[in-house]
């Protein structure tokens, strides 16, 4: 170890070191964009290159990982202007390790890949059973979006999922691959469908969601949403909201589903979930306001009814209820009820965290509860602003 804290092997390698996120180029390729590919960057590459997300031993490094937009046939090329004679990482080995990117499926010749893209477009058919379609106002009449249900039992899906699941490593922190031998896993796949000037339709992968059914006593299921991803090129266009909304609509009408939960949602997905769940509950709260019913104090029976009617987890039902209570009270400007709301939420914060708060003195405990309450209120107001 040198005086500046670096390993001796690192000395003088700064010019040979690059950020793995910056040198990675990912793209969905079709015959329509193959001559002018516009790649997008990954959010994460630590599953391949470690927590520092750096690659040592190359200058002007570019890693190109392209997928045919329909079947996700995969092309990989690694280019650089110079390579260190001693200290350089084996990039291929790190990408192929544990089959994170399946080596057997990789196309290394670009002309071969372009031919594959053309074949994929003409021959590809979505996996599973179509159950919904929609259009976006911004698109022309030749474009629509289709949703399909499938599972690992669906013919050809296991092979397709080998490419699809690689996006999880790049865009969902802490994600893991699913066991393809567990046939209880269910998927909803979202595709863009375009009609070409030649009259046939081509598909592009937009996103997907995976979920798992757990037993719910005595004879129903608790659905747990595990992975939810819209690919970057299709983000910020409303697809995530439309996918979640349709998925939840189907769960609501299924008599075998008692509850829908989410496995460790990240902040972005939790915000989407809060917004859409609150919109689902909002008519009920507006009705209570019109009936001049006092919304507080809130009893457990009311929360249980919301939880069961809308198939929300207990935690999410309470969270949405608090958001909508705050909205209704702010709209009414009822200061007495707003004060009751503040005390109601603070009381819950205390009981949820009482083990941690117990060791604090009274003043510190009051200050901490106030801090948590204000942060929570800020979060709620952000959601309210988007309803």
Image: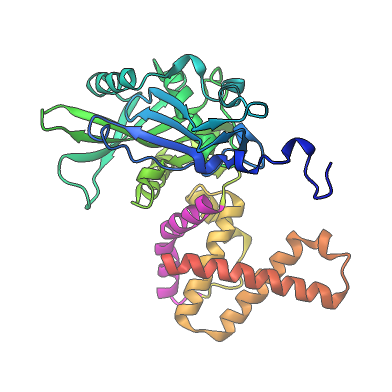
Q: In this view, does 127 lie above or below 190?
A: above
Specify the quadrant that holds the C terminus: bottom left
Residue 284 location (% of width, % of height): 43, 63
Q: Which residue is drawn at 48% across and 64% down?
A: 383
Which x, y percent locates residue 25? 44, 37
Question: Relative to residue 193, is residue 298 depicted above or below?
Answer: below
Residue at 41%, 44% (x, y): give it. 232
From what the image shows, is residue 286 above or below residue 165? below
Q: Position of residue 230 (x, y in %)?
A: 42, 42
**Location of residue 108 (image quadrant):** top left
277 is within the stretch colored magenta = yes
Q: Residue 374 or 192: which is nearer the viewer?
A: 192
**Of the pair 298 and 17, the residue shown nearer to us:** 17
Q: Do we see residue 222 in this rendering?
A: no
Q: Quadrant of the N terminus?
A: top right
- What predominant SS class does the magenta segment belong to? helix
Quarter of the image for residue 215 reads: top right
Front-most of residues 256 and 363: 363
Colour mode of the rendering: rainbow
> In the displayed structure, does residue 114 sit left or right of residue 161?
left
Q: Which residue is drawn at 52% across and 44% down?
A: 43
Part of the protein shown in magenta: 267-293
Visible residue check, residue 39:
yes
* Left or right for 225, reference 25: right
Image coordinates of residue 318 in percent, x first then y, are: 59, 59
Q: Within the magenta stretch, is there residue 357?
A: no
Residue 155 picture quarter: top left
For image coordinates 65% across by 43% down, the residue present is 14
| Farthest left residue in view | 198
């Amino acid at each position: 170890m040198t005086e500046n804290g670096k390993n001796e092997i690192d000395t003088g390698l700064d010019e040979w070191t690059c950020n793995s996120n910056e040198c990675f180029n990912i793209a969905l390729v079709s015959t329509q964009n193959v001559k002018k590919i516009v790649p997008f960057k990954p959010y994460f590459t630590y599953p391949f290159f470690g927590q520092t997300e750096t690659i040592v031993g190359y200058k002007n490094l570019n890693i190109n990982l392209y997928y045919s937009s329909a079947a996700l046939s995969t092309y990989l090329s690694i280019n650089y202007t110079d390579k260190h004679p001693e200290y350089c990482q084996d990039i291929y080995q790190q990408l192929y390790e544990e089959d994170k990117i399946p080596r057997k499926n990789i196309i290394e010749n670009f002309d071969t890949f372009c031919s594959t893209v053309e074949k994929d477009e003409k021959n590809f058919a979505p996996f599973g059973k179509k159950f919904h379609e929609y259009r976006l106002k911004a698109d022309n009449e030749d474009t629509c979006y289709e949703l399909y249900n499938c599972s690992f039992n669906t013919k050809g899906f296991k092979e397709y999922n080998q490419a699809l699941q690689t996006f999880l490593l790049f865009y969902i922190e802490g994600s893991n691959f699913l066991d393809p031998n567990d046939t209880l896993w269910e998927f909803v796949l979202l595709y863009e469908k375009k009609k070409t000037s030649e009259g046939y339709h081509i598909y592009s992968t937009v996103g997907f969601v995976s979920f798992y059914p757990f037993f719910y006593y005595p004879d129903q299921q608790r659905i747990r949403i595990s992975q939810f991803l819209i690919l970057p090129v299709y983000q910020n266009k409303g697809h995530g909201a439309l996918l979640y909304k349709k998925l939840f609509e189907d769960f609501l009408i299924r008599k075998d589903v008692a509850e829908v939960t989410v496995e460790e949602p990240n902040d972005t997905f939790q915000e989407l979930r809060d917004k859409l769940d609150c919109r689902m509950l909002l008519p009920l709260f507006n009705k209570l306001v019109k009936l001049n019913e006092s919304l507080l104090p809130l009893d457990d029976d009311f929360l249980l009814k919301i939880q069961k009617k809308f198939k929300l987890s207990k935690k999410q039902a309470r969270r949405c209820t608090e958001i909508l209570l705050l909205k209704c009270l702010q709209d009414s400007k009822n200061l007495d009820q707003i004060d009751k709301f503040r005390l109601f939420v603070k009381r819950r914060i205390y009981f949820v965290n009482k083990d941690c708060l117990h060791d604090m003195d009274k003043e510190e405990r009051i200050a901490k509860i106030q801090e948590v309450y204000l942060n929570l209120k800020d979060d709620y107001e952000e959601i309210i602003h988007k309803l």
